[in-house]
Image: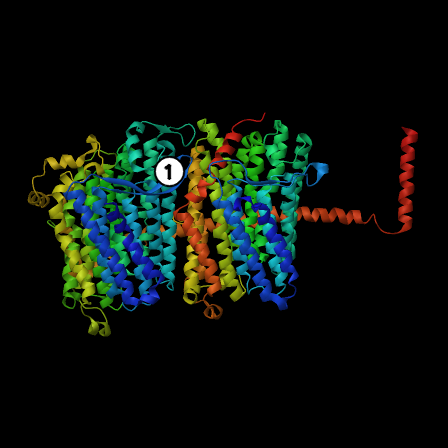
Amino acid sequence: MENIYLGLVLSPLVGAILAGLFGKQIGRAGAHWVTILGVGISFVLSVLVFKYHVFEGAAAYNETVYTWMVSDGITFQIGFLVDQLTALMICVVTFVSLMVHIYTIGYMHDDPGYQRFFSYIALFTFAMLMLVMANNFMQLFFGWEAVGLVSYLLIGFWFKKDTAIYANLKAFLVNRVGDFGFLLGIAAILMYFGSLNYADVFAIAPSLKDSTVEIIPGSEWSLMTVVCILLFIGAMGKSAQVPLHVWLPDSMEGPTPISALIHAATMVTAGVFMVARMSPLFEYSETALGFVMVIGAITAFFMGLVGIVQNDIKRVVAYSTLSQLGYMMVAAGASAYAAAIFHLMTHAFFKALLFLAAGSVIIAMHHKQDIREMGGLKKYMPITYWTSLVGSLALIGFPGTSGFFSKDAIIEAVHASSVPGSDIAYWAVLLGVFITALYSFRMFFIVFHGKERMDQHIKEHLHEPPWVVWAPLVLLAIPSLLIGYFTVDSVLFGNYFGEAIFVLPEHDVLAKLGEGYSSEVGFILHGMMAPPFWLAMGGLFVAWFIYIRKPEIADKIKNSMQWVYTLLDKKYYADEFNAFFFAGGSRGIGRFLWRNGDARIIDGLIVNGSANTVGWISSVLRRMQTGYLYHYAFTMIVGMLAILSWYLFI
Amino acid sequence: MLSELPLLSLAIWVPIIGGLIVLATGGDGNAPRTRMVALFVSVVTLVLTIPLYTLFDINTPKMQFAEKSAEPWISAFDVYYHLGIDGFAMPLIILTSFTTVLVILAGWDVIKTRVAQYMAAFLIMEGFVIGVFSSLDAMLFYVFWEGMLIPMFLIIGIWGGPNRVYASIKFFLYTFLGSVLMLVALIYMYLKSGSFGILDFHTLKLDSLEQTLIFLAFLTAFAVKVPMWPVHTWLPDAHVEAPTGGSVILAAIMLKVGGYGFLRFSLPITPDASHSLDWLMISLSLIAVVYIGFVALVQQDMKKLIAYSSISHMGFVTLGFFIAFSIYDRTGSMSGAAMGIEGGMVQMISHGFISGALFLCVGVLYDRMHSRNISDYGGVANKMPKFAALAVLFAMANAGLPGTSGFVGEFMVILASFKANFWFAFAGATILILGAAYTLWMVKRVFYGEVANDNVAALKDINTREYFILAILAITVLFFGLYPNPLLEVMHPTVDNLLHHISQSKL
């Protein structure tokens, strides 16, 4: 098996290297073929691995590939841990990646950086696989930063655009703030657990659950809480949780395929994956779980609200991604890790679909992204329309779609949870359903229905994009619609994850839900009577009413609630705050220290000051050596007198 | 057969004598031959230092490849010609010979005046630096240590920028004043022990006051070289004025002799003073990381920015070396301290590659545009895609991205300092944010965006020679990032030995 795992990880890397270093030699077609082949092999092998671990029930694979270094008796390794959780992740990652690779052939068709783009997305696939297959914290951090690097390169792919290079720098730095906490968390793990290997750390965890640490002298904190919150800060960066969410909307400056792959389906969910992977640690700290849940709830609710007022087609989807990431975190905080991963999977499909569909619209609209200039696209782009509808229904959790199962499970799980903060979180995710439906169908109706607001030139050229673009849409629409139905049984309520996810019995909300669960159909029927369904329908209806039936209401509401609108339009002023306080503040501190510390005190006062003092003293002393004989004679006489008087009088 | 050669002597004297021969090749009319001879000498030296690694016994902390003259070199003071290396010196020697080859290549057709003197200065410098790293006699060490200043002084003073006189004098006085106190300390210990052997100093009994004074004397010498805050202000000036090759040697090698000095002298000779003054070292290191990180953020001159970044990164070196005692005080054992010291060593080596590469990158731009101001650039990636790709890689390495060598040392030191105190790790880890901020912000302003002006529009991508130099460095940076173990293996016994030594009080 080891060769299969290695091949699975390395084949995208080989593709990336070939396309990146020899892009000119192999040409455009060569570049997309090697990378698609690489990722394709990876996908096939992932399916094999999935079959091996899930259907054949093979035990988890946990082996070292090579020793990175040894220091102080601690071995740092590169190695793989493959269990049910990993198997699911690699299938999702490689499938979405493969779809995006194919889609890119069409989307980036005229771009001069064609080969570079394929090289990057293949490299991303490699990095993401290393992340999810890691068997230790160091490699996790490797993958973590490597996906961040590729994200940086891809957001700034069009490096001539000022907004793009601003966005990629911002994304990298905000992620670094998260990594700052993450790295400290890793350091804490090494210190208190004595190892960075998951297996060792998880084995020791129960014995350390009552340990305390003293970070601020005089106050004892639970070790598990400190470790988990530090690690979670990393997840907040990568999975764009409030207040580290600010980079994700801006990341839409990158080409649409990577928004689908990196900023919706895979990389941004790494934080959720990490929390699920670390469930043997998080389970021992209710404080940390509560923290995760509250942060997730804030993100889910408030980011969804912003989505309602966005007019850029990609930004609406981006805010929806933020909100859905919040849902996943809430699930993780409720100890319903399986539901979090389940939602991660369904979301990967339908959100990648929505992004790619948005990209398809963007191509048709000649790279215009403002939804106010669209409308009535249904009749020009039927495939995009129907697949978007599937994606949107899945997103709002329409009964039967994959998103329904995962989202409903999350809401129910939070309802059943007793972790501190679960009351607020419940209301946030519940009302979030209404908001989700509102912004999703607001966009859907404005783009595909209603008046055709685009100009004549664009209208004449409107048509369905080539098959490389629409085929991935169809292929993603299938799992968006169906995968929930076929997997809910085992993933949520069965023992799909086995040992891979650890839940303490008293936290096991999914088991509680499972008691009331009979079958998929029962779940659907039950869902249709529960509040989330009615909230979703309400949202859908309101969207229809405002944006199709009576479009003039929208402006009326906007005008009557001006301050709310402005607050949302400005995204709660988070960007302004960060730009002023953090970016401006750091530059201010830097300038102050440089001008005063370095230039004025050290160089001015001490270095040049002492040089000047020496110069001044010597200029005084120099006067004594005038070269006139009578000066010297006079000095001798004075000196002699002084010595004589010394001897005479003392 | 190879092991019977006096490899260390050869590594010292081949470049020095080779440098004299290069000098003799004469005027600039002869420049092509001068360059070939210089390159030949530097490559021979590199080849001579490779057996130091391949024949190195990684299981002993003893000094290897030792050479000691039977007769004293200066009999009146019992000064011997005594050489030998351990796991600290060996990697630094190879770094030196490796970097010198690249520097000779980097100056290939950039330096057009006084070519012979330029090349000779670097070769002689190389010999002196290898001498510093391999001396086991304190006087011999001191001679090489001071000798090293002369070629550097000339390099900045002759081939430097407009403000070169101020910079070279500042550089010289700063470093010279620092080392005078070290000389006093060395002589004091000679008078006390009757020997100038560094290893004899290690076992010399010294009381608390003596140790403190000797420690502070060494500190002034080494802190200036590293440089540590607040004696760092010569470095930005020196870098700005130095020619590209000078900056590379300065950053990649000269700074390392300071760090090496702490390991060879301060820690083993004055362990108790190191212990009682470790708070000072740790504070200065953390100030360097944070304070200098902020200062780097607002630099307008690329070379100054990288110079400040160097200071900030070197803070990790001294932090890694001196957290051992805090770990010992807190946990009662030295377990964990080795990672700090090894991390500091790795950081030194890696910083040699990365900062060298970054200065070479600035050199590439400076050769074409004669400006180091960030604001004169913009959109360079449009015109120099190959170069931009390499520069972004080095920038990422400077920001400590995993997979590059820049990550390894920082990672190890942060892990180790967490054991000493949460807040040390906390302050140190800010480099993750600050380092990325100043480096990538510079990348954004220089490389990305639309072509900023006609000068940028006229830029030509790097030629084969430049590509070769940067590619070699890129491979090195990636290799040690993906597989640092070979570097660490060679120092384990040396580090363990040092830790064992410093955990025993001399009082």
User: Residue at the location (33% across, 62% down)?
Assistant: A116
Q: Is residue A143 left or right of residue A508?
A: right
Q: Is residue B110 above or below residue B214?
A: below
Q: Which residue is mark 1?
A: A75
Q: Is residue B402 left or right of residue B273?
A: left
Name the one closer to the observer, A213 or B137.
B137
Could you say where residue B324 lies in the image, as x and y percent from the top left?
49, 33
Name the one closer to the observer, B190 or A625.
B190
Q: Secondary structure at mark 1?
A: strand
User: Residue at the location (39% across, 50% down)?
Assistant: A173
Q: Is residue A564 above or below residue B60?
A: below
* Residue lying furthest top: B507
Q: Is residue B234 left or right of residue B455?
A: right
Q: Quadrant of the N terminus of chain A?
A: top left
Q: Quadrant of the C terminus of chain A?
A: top right
User: Residue at the location (25% across, 63% down)?
Assistant: A33
Could you say where residue B454 lies in the image, as x and y percent from the top left?
48, 71
| Kind of residue at disc 1 | Thr
* Residue lying furthest front: B1
Name the one closer to the observer, A541 or A146.
A146
Label 1 marks which chain's residue?
A
Q: Is residue A315 visible?
A: no
